[in-house]
Image: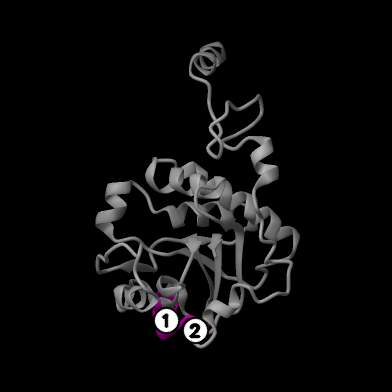
Amino acid sequence: MKWLNHLVDIIYPKTCEACGEPLSGGEKLICTQCLIDLPRTNTHLNPDKLIERRFWGKINVSHTTAYLKFSKKSKVQHLLHQLKYRNKPEVGVMLGELYGQDLKAAGFGNDIDILIGVPLHNEKEKQRGYNQANCIAEGLSNTLDIPYVTTAAKKALKTETQTKKSRFERFRNVQDVFEITDKELIKNKHIAIVDDVLTTVSTIESFAEILLENGCAEVSVITIAIAD
């Protein structure tokens, strides 16, 4: 049936999830040029405390790193839009795998025990069909050889969107919304929290606190993008 798939590709060519241009043979989801052009932060290599500063005075994190720089109307925003709102979970898996390759080459995460995506409320996850953070965690797991778990915690309360909220309003919006569902999975573990975009850190701060309060030994943070 390869000829049929080839015919379908001719009639309905697959396009790059970043720029919308047709993919060439061998390209998957993101074209080669866009892969080259993606604005990497290299925070896993750079000793600058770009991300750590956002957590100072809030929560103690061991490692923090982000793959790409986020800006409005950019290819990065388009990729994450495809992941979150266009039913493209495979984009999250691929971005996780790509970043996982970079992290592994740098020896990052050798002391991390498990990966956990920031939980979504059940209602939102059912509506979307998946949790985008878990897709990224799956991709990271594939290349870092670190297990990811989805049953250790849940988001018990549905919160309003964080968009256009002040930093204080964002923190209040996510206070006490997470619950640990399996303490044995996180007990004495070094956990890397995985999410799509790091902005004011309120959500991750709240999730990290509940993990540490329930026996987690250390917390690190891995995101695909960081906003200015």
Say which element carries label 1: helix
Q: Residue 212's x, y, as percent?
A: 45, 83
Q: Earlier in the sequence, mark 1 or mark 2?
A: 2
Q: Is residue 151 visible?
A: yes
**Corner quadrant of residue 178:** bottom left
Q: Pick whichever, 142 or 89, lies toward us.
A: 89
**Corner quadrant of residue 174:** bottom left
Disc 1 or disc 2, which is closer to the eye? Answer: 2
Residue under numbered circle 1: 209
Give the magenta part as a residue range. 206-218
Query: Number of marks in the image?
Result: 2
Residue under numbered circle 2: 59
Name the kind of residue labelled 1 in the image.
Glu
Q: Which residue corresponds to the image point at 47% horizontal and 65% vertical from the top-left?
A: 116
Q: Is residue 166 above or below residue 13?
A: below
Name the kind of residue labelled 2 in the image.
Ile
Q: Is residue 109 above or below residue 61?
A: above
- Distance, label 1 to label 2, CA atoms, is 7 Å
- Residue 107 highlighted magenta (yes or no): no
Q: Which residue corresponds to the image point at 31% horizontal and 53% vertical from the top-left?
A: 125
Q: Which residue corresponds to the image point at 41% horizontal and 85% vertical from the top-left?
A: 213
